[in-house]
Amino acid sequence: MKTKIWANFSVQDLDRTTKFYKQLGFKPNGASDQLTSFFFGEEDFIIHFFLKDILEPAMKGPITDEKAGNEIIFTLSAETREEVDNWEKEVRKAGGTVVSMPEEFGKGYYGFVFADPDGHKFNVFQM
């Protein structure tokens, strides 16, 4: 079956979300009064960030409190340890929360976890 895939997240503030992801260098995919959208990675994976009041009724149930638990974690790859460390600094500057500092996860694995201003988690990982 041929299909496309993208992700939808809820947010409280579209302007804050747009500023955060632009500051990290992600390419915008458009915006409206209900959402802001960005391309991620070399294959232009799309994540739409909808206002919670718009997305929740479409989900047919409550949306998880991202700050109280985990919904999903997307991994952003880095080529070097230095790139991982630079991501950590840029995430802080952009207003994100570093959940775990860059660290080694066994031989040849290095990374950290961060949350955007709405609590959506990502990790940056070099291997």
Image (spheres, rainbow, N blue to C red):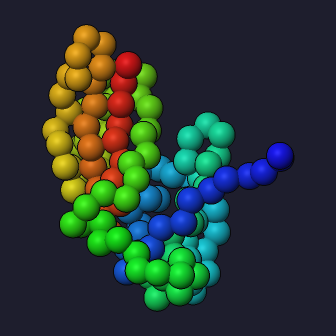
Seen in the picture, residue 1 relative to 125 is either above or below; the reply is: below
Seen in the picture, residue 66 relative to 114 is either above or below; the reply is: below
Q: On the image, which quarter does residue 79 sit in? A: top left
Residue located 40% across and 75% down the image = 63
Residue located 23% across and 16% down the image = 106
Front one among 61 and 124: 61
**Direction from residue 5 to residue 101 in the image, left or right:** left
Q: Where is residue 26 in the image (x, y as percent from the top left)?
A: 51, 52
Residue located 44% across and 38% down the image = 76
**Direction from residue 102 to residue 20 in the image, left or right:** right
Residue located 83% across and 46% down the image = 1
Q: Is residue 46 visible?
A: yes
**Direction from residue 107 to residue 5 in the image, left or right:** right
Q: Where is residue 78 in the image (x, y as percent from the top left)?
A: 41, 29
Front one among 97 and 89: 97
Front one among 45 and 63: 63
Seen in the picture, residue 43 relative to 95 is either above or below; the reply is: above
Q: Where is residue 7 in the image (x, y as percent from the top left)?
A: 56, 59
Q: Is residue 23 visible?
A: no
Front one among 82 and 41: 41
Image quadrant holding the C terminus, namely top left
In the current view of this chain or complex, which residue is farthest to the top? Answer: 107
In the current view of this chain or complex, which residue is farthest to the right? Answer: 2
Q: Position of residue 82 (x, y in %)?
A: 29, 25
Q: How many marks can you see?
A: 0
